[in-house]
Image (cartoon, helix red, strand yellow):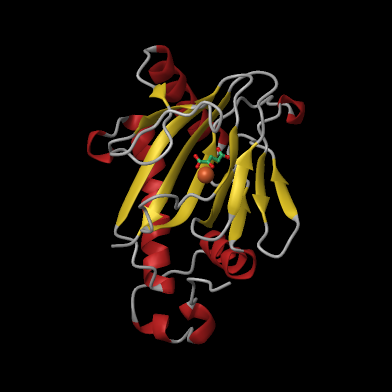
């Protein structure tokens, strides 16, 4: 499988001694994982207080009924298909970001800048939505670049569940590895999963208890 990443630090560390550049070890780990496995799991991307703020904002919006039934496909081609996915989503407008969303985008934008600088990723666009999976819902195995969005390069999922989220609640993200095998990832609060949108099929197992909260999005090239 072709990877999208050239990590320039691996090629030439000295280059960065001439420009104003600070190595970020957290981001380097993500890049290393992506190069090796095409996905990365980061348990401390957001800290507990940030997750709390994001969770509260998500629940408030959900309760205000701003979410609509998720749709298969993109915004111009929406076909509601409950048999495939059952989550409720709300797209986030970065231009109108509230306090919680600003916290979120500050971190994401730092990562994007780093990827563009060190890996020449050419990320120009991004799109993110809140997602709530009530008990009984799931998202069947799929690739994130279905239909007409080949610009999606990296998928990012951030889990906003309560601190006491139980692994027995279901809602695991399963990533299917291209050469066999699978990675089962529990949606623990603060955890972020990043993976190559065009390569890795994945699914969200049925939520069997509680509701599963997240922000999901995509980094896109031109
Ligand atoms: O919430 C997750 O773990 C993954 C969600 C997902 O696959 C999607 O929204 O495309
Ligand atoms: Fe997906």
**Which image quarter: residue 166?**
top right
**Residue at coordinates 23% horizontally, 33% vertically from top-left?**
96
Q: Residue furthest left?
A: 95
**Which image quarter: residue 163?**
top right
Out of 205 and 53, give the one closest to the viewer: 205
Vertical comparison of 18 with 134: above or below = below
Residue 194 in view, yes or no = yes
| Quadrant (top left, top right, bottom left, bottom right) of the N terminus | bottom right
Q: Position of residue 130 (x, y in %)?
A: 43, 31
Out of 47 and 195, give the one closest to the viewer: 195
**Residue at coordinates 38% horizontally, 14% vertically from top-left?**
65
Out of 162 and 79, give the one closest to the viewer: 79
Q: Residue furthest top?
A: 64
**Residue at coordinates 34% horizontally, 67% vertically from top-left?**
122
Q: Position of residue 2 (x, y in %)?
A: 54, 74
Vertical comparison of 70 with 46: above or below = above
**Which image quarter: residue 21?**
bottom left
Vertical comparison of 183 with 23: above or below = above
**Residue at coordinates 60% horizontally, 56% vertically from top-left?**
40
Residue 46 in view, yes or no = no
Vertical comparison of 161 with 32: above or below = above
The tally of labels here is 0
| Quadrant (top left, top right, bottom left, bottom right) of the C terminus | bottom left
Q: Position of residue 220 (x, y in %)?
A: 36, 57
Q: Position of residue 64 (x, y in %)?
A: 37, 12
């Amino acid at each position: 499988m072709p990877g999208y990443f050239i990590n320039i630090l691996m090629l030439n560390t000295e280059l960065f001694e001439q420009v104003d550049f600070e190595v970020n070890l957290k981001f380097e780990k993500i890049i290393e994982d992506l190069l090796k496995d095409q996905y990365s799991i980061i348990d401390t991307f957001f800290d507990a207080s940030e997750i709390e703020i994001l969770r509260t904002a998500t629940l408030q919006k959900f309760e205000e009924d701003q979410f609509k039934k998720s749709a298969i496909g993109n915004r111009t081609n929406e076909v509601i298909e409950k048999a495939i996915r059952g989550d409720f989503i709300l797209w986030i407008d970065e231009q109108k970001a509230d306090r919680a969303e600003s916290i979120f985008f500050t971190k994401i934008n730092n990562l994007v800048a780093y990827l563009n600088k060190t890996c020449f990723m050419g990320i120009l666009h991004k799109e993110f939505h809140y997602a709530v999976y009530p008990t009984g819902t799931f998202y069947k195995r799929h690739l994130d670049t279905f239909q007409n969005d080949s610009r999606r390069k990296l998928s990012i999922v951030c889990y906003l569940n309560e601190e006491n989220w139980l692994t027995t609640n279901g809602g695991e993200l399963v990533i299917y590895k291209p050469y066999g095998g699978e990675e089962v990832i529990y949606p623990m609060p603060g955890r972020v999963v990043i993976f190559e949108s065009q390569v890795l099929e994945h699914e969200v197992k049925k939520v069997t208890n509680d509701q599963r909260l997240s922000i999901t999005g995509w980094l896109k090239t031109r």
